[in-house]
Amino acid sequence: MSKLVDTGSTLPAENLEPTEECKRSLDQMLTLSENAFKRWTFDAYNSQLANARSYMWIATALLAAHVGLFKMLTVDDFQEKLLVIIPLAIAAIAAVCVFRVSSTVAFGNYSAEVVTGSSSLFAHKYESGGESGKRLYEYKINLLNAINRAAILAVASSNIRGRKLRASGRCLEVSFLASILSLIVFFVVS
């Protein structure tokens, strides 16, 4: 499990102007933090979304197969029919669980806001005819902290979705194995 740590703000003393090296380092940190944020909010989410959709398609196909097998049941003896129906019911319930859990991942409503207050900063910059390096440095530090907080939220949300997808995978395995068992019993009984 990946974790990001919020280190808090480290602004220079009130009367000190940040050095050029410090400004360059901050710009590099902003670029790296933004890239990490994009990986967690877009790339990881899209990968998990693709997995959830695949699980839903597989669960739908298994449910269709379960209905088809149930329609094929012509066993006259109730006990023999029960031996086929029990694993078939377990498989169908597991497939429905896969569909339900995967749909919560696929249709979630996660969003992370990063930039806040930037319009007032730049409006002030243009109204005053310029912006001091210290004010822009403070803004970048605050932006870096906001990106880090949003990345922490994105990692936490990704971990929750990951747990749900792992549970869906286990339910899919149960559904598949119960389907196989039901088929074996069906062919032995018929």
Image (cartoon, rainbow, N blue to C red):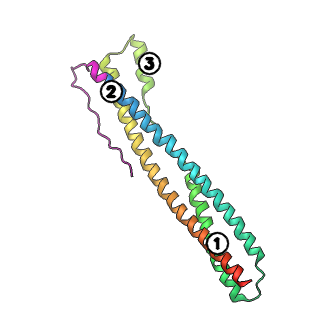
- Quick check: 106 above or below 29? below
Q: Tell me if residue 8 is in the magenta stretch.
A: yes
Question: Tag 1's secondary structure?
Answer: helix
Circle 1/circle 3 CB separation < 8 Å = no
Three-letter code, disc 2: Leu
Query: Which stretch did the figure color magenta?
Result: 1-23
Q: What is the number of the mark on residue 123?
A: 3
Earlier in the chain: of badge 1 and badge 3, it is 3
Which image quadrant is residue 58 in? bottom right
Q: Residue at x 42, y 49 (%)?
A: 156
Residue 16 percent coordinates (x, y) = 22, 20
The crowd level at tag 3 (other Cα within 10 Å; few <14, some 14-19, many 20+) is: few
Residue hosting label 2: 26
Residue 54 percent coordinates (x, y) = 61, 54
- Quick check: 165 above or below 71? above
Question: Tag 2's secondary structure?
Answer: helix
Q: What is the number of the mark on residue 118?
A: none
Three-letter code, disc 1: Ser
Earlier in the chain: of badge 2 and badge 3, it is 2
Closer to us: 169 or 30:
169
Question: Tag 3's secondary structure?
Answer: helix
Q: What distance separates the C-alpha of mark 2 from that of mark 1? A: 57 Å
Residue hosting label 1: 179
Q: Is residue 19 visible?
A: yes
Q: Tell me if residue 40 is in the magenta stretch.
A: no
- Secondary structure mostly seen in the magenta stretch: loop
